[in-house]
Image (tube, helix red, strand yellow):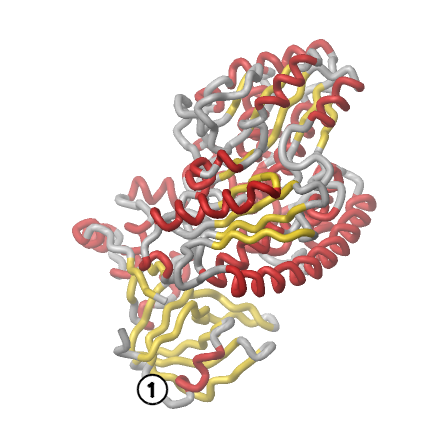
């Protein structure tokens, strides 16, 4: 693994070091996050609700709000059509709760992953028509729903699209499209997730109704959940959203979140983004992966604690079943990748199989991508010969651009540079695979295939003191765009006896540099055990963290890589 150090401007680092009277390690880490002065540090370290942008800067917000108010004021029902993942269900929950509070008659509809697939569906439109609904608002989907929007218009139903996925040059004929990533949208922050866009729409309606913003800010816990799950950058107003949303979750979580936190063993812990991503999101996603995702909206919006507890137990059981299915598909995909891909030549992996569960292919794609460090597409083919695929990428490879290049072989696609989805006919699989691999060949170099570890700075162990730890605390909340800083320290002496722990994949030991010593833990790094017991000096790459164990807090180095000192 290649260690890559960020290299901010040296004069800026010196300026920060002098201005804040701090260490080089802290100054470099600040510079890496765009903190250039005391003024910018105040904005970064103290996120405030006043930093949120005016929702009406977003293109078409006026039209969307006016159309919604027409239905609220006339009493005509509104359908909120969400996606089945965490971002889509939190977005739908946000609009359901806010529009209902505004006096609207609101129904929610989440499509079935297997029966309807991704995005706005004709079945959902037919259901709206049966309920005499003349307005559908999409959440986290719809930007490519050309045929479906036309079908809705044929049935005298208006559609407002709220989405954050990258649009094509051509757009659906919706009443309004609210998406900050439209090329001619002046909204200053493009990194909102679907829940974030839905929240801005709710704020727009609330402003027109002279509604208290305090009431709307009570929804930031749900926006935070969607933002965390969708791995959008926790920068700009996302940083404000997540900081304030985590406060709500830690202070008094709504009944559904409280119930999920309890089943995840997180109820009495200080909840951070990682807890939401790995502890809460899988439970909510499980509803849509294996069954009816409307349960996700139900648990996120209910005020009934008993119902919330029942739903949380149900989702926990479903998530366990999802894990079993997922591991089976991961193992099959690993075997298939080794058998079918020429890893000495191919710069991407594209796999398809009958019978793979479409609800787990996104997770499987991520696992294969991590294993082989290549852009990966995993496709589940059903009995009708339709393949539903999920793709995950590596730094420097734009999946959306790659799928656009291969779009002649696809029925549908959408997503981001790092994660995307697609559908195709079985007979087009080989042509798609060839086109995708060709794009990867042209856009990735040999060096891109080598995993890289991005580090903030090289530090001395004695840099790690109480001020340093307070600085790390203020840098949060962490997430994409503001990951926890990673450091390197060189020529460390291994002290005590390294121990292999857990299931045999992890290792724990202690390191010392001059008079400073810290415990270190390396998850999935036990292959370094033989080198460590030799007593040779080591270079370590790590995250500095506080470990809570049996009521005692200690600073430890959570390792990302181990190298012999002076090795290249």
Instruction: Answer few, some or many: residues within 10 Å of disc 1's Cα (few below 14, many 20 plus, some between 14 and 19).
Output: few
- Residue 205 visible to the viewer: yes
Q: Residue at x 51, y 19 (%)?
A: 61
Q: Is residue 66 left or right of residue 23?
A: right
Residue hosting label 1: 536
Pinpoint residue 225: horizontal percent, then vertical percent: 59, 44
Question: Which corner quadrant of the image does residue 266 belong to?
Answer: bottom right
With respect to residue 29, does 539 lie above or below?
Answer: below
552 or 339, nearer to the observer = 339
Q: Is residue 225 left or right of residue 462?
A: right
229 or 270, nearer to the observer = 229
Q: Is residue 14 left or right of residue 144?
A: left
With respect to residue 265, does 290 lie above or below?
Answer: above
**Which element type, helix, strand or loop, lies under badge 1?**
loop
Most distant residue in the left direction: 11
Pinpoint residue 4: horizontal percent, then vertical percent: 30, 60
Pinpoint residue 182: horizontal percent, then vertical percent: 44, 25
Q: Residue at x 50, y 49 (%)?
A: 392
Q: Residue at x 65, y 27 (%)?
A: 98
- Residue 239 visible to the viewer: no
Number of labelled discs? 1
144 or 67, nearer to the observer = 144
In which quadrant will I find the C terminus? bottom left
Q: Residue at x 40, y 63 (%)?
A: 344
In which quadrant will I find the N terminus? bottom left
Pinpoint residue 204: horizontal percent, then vertical percent: 55, 21
């Amino acid at each position: 693994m290649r260690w890559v150090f960020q290299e901010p401007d040296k004069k800026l680092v010196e300026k920060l070091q002098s201005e804040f009277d701090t260490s080089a390690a802290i100054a470099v880490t600040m510079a890496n996050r765009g903190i250039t002065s005391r003024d910018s540090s105040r904005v970064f370290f103290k996120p405030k609700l006043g930093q949120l942008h005016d929702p009406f800067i977003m293109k078409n917000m006026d039209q969307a709000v006016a159309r919604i108010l027409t239905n609220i004021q006339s009493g005509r029902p509104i359908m909120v059509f969400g996606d089945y993942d965490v971002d889509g269900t939190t977005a739908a929950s946000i609009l359901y709760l806010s529009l209902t509070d505004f006096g609207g008659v609101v129904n929610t509809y989440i499509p079935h992953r297997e029966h309807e697939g991704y995005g706005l569906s004709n079945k959902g439109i037919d259901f709206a028509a049966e309920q005499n609904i003349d307005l559908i608002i999409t959440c986290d989907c719809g930007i490519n729903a050309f045929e479906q929007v036309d079908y809705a218009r044929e049935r005298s139903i208006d559609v407002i699209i709220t989405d954050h996925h990258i649009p094509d040059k051509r757009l659906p004929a919706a009443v309004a499209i609210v998406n900050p990533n439209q090329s001619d949208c002046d909204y200053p922050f493009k990194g909102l997730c679907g829940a974030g866009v839905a929240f801005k729409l709710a704020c727009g309606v609330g402003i027109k109704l002279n509604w208290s913003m305090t009431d709307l800010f009570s929804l930031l816990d749900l926006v935070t959940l969607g933002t965390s799950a969708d791995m959008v950058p926790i920068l700009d107003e996302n940083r404000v959203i997540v900081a304030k949303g985590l406060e709500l979750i830690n202070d008094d979580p709504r009944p559904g979140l409280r119930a999920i936190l309890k089943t995840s063993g997180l109820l009495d812990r200080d909840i951070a983004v990682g807890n939401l991503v790995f502890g809460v999101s899988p439970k909510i996603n499980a509803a849509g992966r294996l069954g009816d995702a409307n349960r996700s909206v139900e648990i996120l919006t209910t005020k009934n604690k008993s119902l919330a507890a029942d739903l949380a137990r149900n989702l926990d059981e479903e998530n366990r079943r999802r894990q079993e299915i997922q591991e089976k598909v991961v193992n099959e995909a690993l075997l298939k990748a080794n058998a079918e891909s020429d890893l000495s030549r191919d710069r991407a992996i594209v796999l398809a199989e009958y019978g793979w569960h479409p609800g787990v292919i996104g997770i499987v794609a991520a696992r294969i991508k991590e294993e082989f460090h290549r852009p990966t597409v995993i496709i589940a083919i059903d009995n009708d010969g339709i393949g539903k695929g999920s793709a995950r990428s590596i730094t420097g490879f734009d999946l959306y651009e790659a799928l656009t290049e291969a779009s002649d072989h696809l029925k549908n696609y959408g997503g981001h540079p790092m994660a995307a989805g697609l559908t195709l006919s079985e007979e087009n699989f080989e042509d798609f695979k060839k086109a995708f691999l060709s794009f990867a060949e042209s856009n990735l170099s040999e060096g891109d295939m080598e995993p890289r570890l991005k580090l903030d700075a090289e530090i001395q162990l004695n840099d790690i003191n109480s001020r340093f730890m307070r600085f790390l605390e203020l840098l949060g909340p962490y997430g994409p765009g503001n990951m926890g800083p990673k450091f390197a320290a060189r020529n460390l002496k291994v002290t005590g006896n390294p121990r292999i722990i857990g299931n045999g994949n992890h290792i724990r030991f202690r390191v010392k540099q001059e008079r400073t010593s810290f415990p270190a833990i390396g998850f999935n790094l036990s292959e370094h055990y033989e080198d460590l017991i030799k007593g040779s000096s080591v270079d370590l790459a790590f995250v500095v963290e506080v470990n809570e164990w049996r009521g005692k807090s200690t600073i430890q180095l959570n390792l990302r890589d181990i190298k012999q000192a002076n090795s290249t």
